[in-house]
Amino acid sequence: MKKFLNLRGGRKLEVGSKTLIAGILNFTPDSFSDGGKFFNPDSATVHAVHLIEHGADMIDVGAESTRPGATPLEAEEEFARLEKILPAIINLGAPVSIDTYKPEVAERALELGADIINDVRGLEDSRMIDVAKKFNAPVIAMHNEKCLEDDIIGDVKKFFRLTLAKCEAHGFDTTQLILDPGIGFGKTLTDDLTILRRLDELKNLDGREITLMIGVSRKSFIGKMTGLKIGERDEATGALCVHAITKGVDIVRAHNVKMISRMCLVTDKLLKGI
């Protein structure tokens, strides 16, 4: 089923026809995959250009690492980083999502012209919903909890239901909500693999079709499965993305956009005939 995400300036981003790719841009010195590699405004902008040229449908910009053990940033420092690169990234024309869990950072980024909020704490702070509503911006809410029951799928479904209810209580248009089961966040390897095997069970919730996003790119669970080092995990990432598409996932986050976009293209042609 096709949906349209609202972007700044009255633009729309179609979801459901092709798999969308969110190209990862870490403007940090300490991200697990490429920490420091693009921690310079010029190199970050050049990398964003390459991501778009190679098939990214949006650029997901983060200024604070979410890897385990990373040092948290104050909102002012996080936005000070974003402010150095956002105008140039936004001017490239592709939709821009902001990877932050701080409402004040999200609000200032949207004021600069960003389009989408990517909240890795799953709207834990409900002020984030009000920020999204103020700007009529789509929100990605990620499950970021340890499994409290025997069935991780049941936990994720419970989170999805609560998130939908919270958004509705704030008067937020839930057609603009994207849900992410949070692979690698607060989960065991068994949890991660169970979610991946059963992604199709998350696509439809109580008769409501969910817009699903996953982030598996180069993550540690791939290393646990295969013994591969971080820089060796792109092929495995691609295989997982292809699998996710067959299970109904709409958006995948990727570091190696060139490789993943080609794999998604062929998978879409096979499954969707586009």
Image (cartoon, helix red, strand yellow):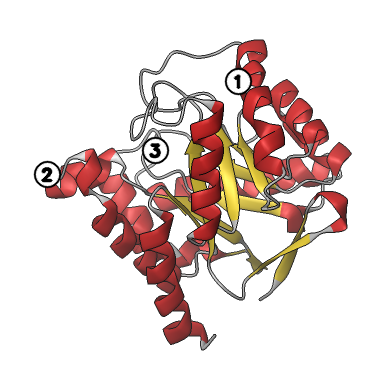
Q: Which residue is mark 1?
A: 81
Q: Quadrant of the N terminus?
A: bottom right
Q: Residue at x 81, y 52 (%)?
A: 173
How far across and how far down the image is residue 37, in percent? 39, 30
Mark 3 vs 2: CB contact within 8 A: no
Callout 3 environment at 10 Å: few (<14), some (14 to 19), or many (20+)?
Answer: some
Q: At which x and y percent is residue 124?
A: 63, 29
First in sequence: mark 1 or mark 3?
1
Q: Residue at x 47, y 78 (%)?
A: 268
Q: Disc 3 on helix, strand or loop?
A: loop
- How many other residues sit within 10 Å of disc 1, few (<14), some (14-19) or many (≥20)? some
- 53 or 129: which is nearer to us? 53
Query: Badge 2 is on which residue?
Result: 227
Query: Which dot, 3 or 2, sits closer to the camera?
Result: 2
Neighbours of disc 2 within 10 Å: few (<14), some (14-19), many (20+):
few
N-terminal of the pair, mark 3 or mark 2, is 3
Judged by depth in the image, the label closer to the viewer, 1 or 3, is 1
> Which image quadrant for residue 10?
bottom right
Hey, what amino acid is under mark 1? Arg
Task: Give the residue at mark 3.
Answer: 147
Q: Is residue 22 left or right of residue 264?
A: right
**Element type at mark 2:** loop
The C terminus lies in which quarter of the figure? bottom right
Question: Would residue 117 be seen by someone viewing this image from the given angle?
Answer: no
Q: Position of residue 218 (x, y in %)?
A: 31, 45
